[in-house]
Amino acid sequence: MNSSNRQQVYTVYTWSTMDDDHETGSVRGDLCERVVAPASAMRVGAGRSLCVVVAAVLAACATNPSAVDCEAGRACPTERDAGNPGADADVDAEMPMDAARLDDGSPPWDDAGSASADAEVGTDGGPRTITSVERESRTLVCKLISGDELGYESDNRTHTRFNLRGTDLGIPAIVGDDLTLFFGDTHGWRDIWRVGEDPDSVARVSLSAARADLRALCDQLDFYVTADTPSVAAAGDPSILRDFEGAYLTAPPGERIRDYIDRPVPFFETETGSFAGSFEVPAGALGRPDGAYVFWATRPGTGSIGPMRLSFLARWAGGPRLNQQILYPLDDLAWGRPLGGHFLQVSPVERDGFLYLFGTGEYRRDGVHVARKPIAQIDVPGGFELYDPRLGDWIAATSIGADERAAIPAVLDEDVRGIGELGVQYVDSAGLFVMMFQQLSDTSGGNNMVLSVAQRPEGPWTSVPIITMHDPLFAARHCCVGDRCPGEQILHCDRAGLYGIYPLPLIESTRTSEGVVLDVPFTASTWQPYNVVLFRTRVLVRGL
């Protein structure tokens, strides 16, 4: 396509019937109305049978008919050809304010369905390498917390079973025989936890049940609860059975809790311990038979909501209580930057005797960096090596100064530098690291949920977009129309975007003649309504 001939035409499509083909990513329907309109006239139509898709198409595309020529029997715009400038409406006053918003622009991908790696396939008996990754399908499995809106229950019935109406994140770890999810700021339903206090909850489901049927997460999620029986809200509402428990943090011996968190929950705070309040959340977790190591991102010393600037490691000894002992600070942006300030959001992976950390620093202003240390030393501060892609080698973090550590480039997304939360899993059956992250920056071309794969933690990494927020196909199926979000509608796309993308340790692989197919379940946070949803995607990794 000759970019000099591009001309954007905004077209409003209305379907009376619609079917999303997960295999091809296409939408089929009876086209009952089409209106060419300027961007200022774009709207979501009320009273339509299902939805209105707003698409910005490239009218001069030589290989695809333009929007004004799209008729029955001809190819309509694909997600590669489309973009949807996002509205910038206010978020509800009770909600925190750093949710991902929609941006203008097309995805920064050569092809919305695939991406190529620089490495070549060996032809002389050398090791096989990844040549491309292609998304084959994406399916919404269910909503984990609320239903149509915050006041409506999902099949997990968290409102009445745990007095819990909303939360985000859902960082996975295998703890004993359970798949455990570490959630972020959590809102109570009746009489507990005022908005702004927001402790961080934890839930679990049987690992064997989740492996047998992914939908076990949809109706068998079991949150850790307080000792109160029944709920403190039961006198006013007998349907509420228990109250969810929040993670309680204790500072290392001789240190203050306010050296680690900035927003302790009033009444429960002591000199050495507290629940973490709003916007101080778990970022990653490494499961153990009897508990987990939990990596936190916080902002001590600021006195106000703002970007995270400290990460630390805590140890949870398992239930029934959620007490976590802080072991040591990991990295920071404001002081010595022991890991270069690149490890605020952290996803840990244990592999070949090492603890690998995949991290990003200033929120949505950094790429992905890699650090490691022997797993046997996880309880001991320090000892990390940093991977420097300029040298193609690991260097001891303490062997160079803070500025030199900060100058180490990312192994992934160094140019766009828009990564928020991230999650990484290692898939033994495929010999692959699988990373998922949100990407949003001035040069990212919008809010994208991305999957990347590599054979080594250092890379090279090969990426493919799994969700592009301004994709009209995604909007048609999953953006809410009106005040409620029934069925597969999951978020108010005109107010905020998806974030907090975490692959679950339930990835399955199948080898085919074309490569390795990965079936990847993942959680995503929707912000409005404040919820966590479960997706699964299937990707083809070619070259292996």
Image (cartoon, rainbow, N blue to C red):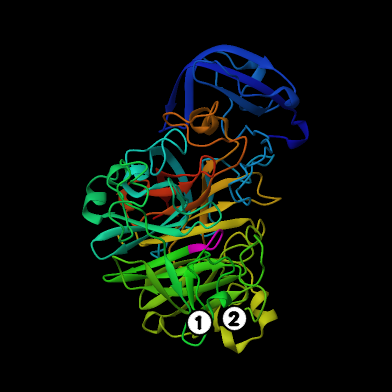
- The span picked out in magenta is 277-282
Report the front residue among 505 and 415: 505
Q: Amino acid at mark 1?
A: Phe
Asked if the residues shown at circle 1 and circle 2 are in contact, with their CB atoms under 8 angstroms apart, the answer is yes
Cα distance between the residues tagged 1 and 2: 9 Å
Q: Position of residue 436 (x, y in %)?
A: 48, 54
Closer to us: 368 or 421: 421
Q: Position of residue 88 (x, y in %)?
A: 69, 38
> Regarding mark 1 in the picture, which secondary structure is present there?
loop
Is 82 situated left or right of 8 in this image?
left
Residue under the image location 41 percent in, 58 percent down: 201
Give yes or no for residue 12 being in the magenta stretch: no
| 364 left or right, relative to 376 | right
Which circle's residue, 1 or 2, is located before the other in the chain? Answer: 2
Quadrant of image for the N terminus: top right
Q: Mark 2 is on which residue type?
A: Pro
The disc label shown at residue 338, or none = 2
For label 1, the residue is 384
The quarter of the displayed image where residue 343 is located: bottom right
Please state the horizontal and vertical placement of residue 527, each as a whole percent of the image.
Answer: 54, 45
Given residues 241 and 37, the one toward you in this image is 241
Residue drawn at the location 49% of the way across and 15% of the way down: 49
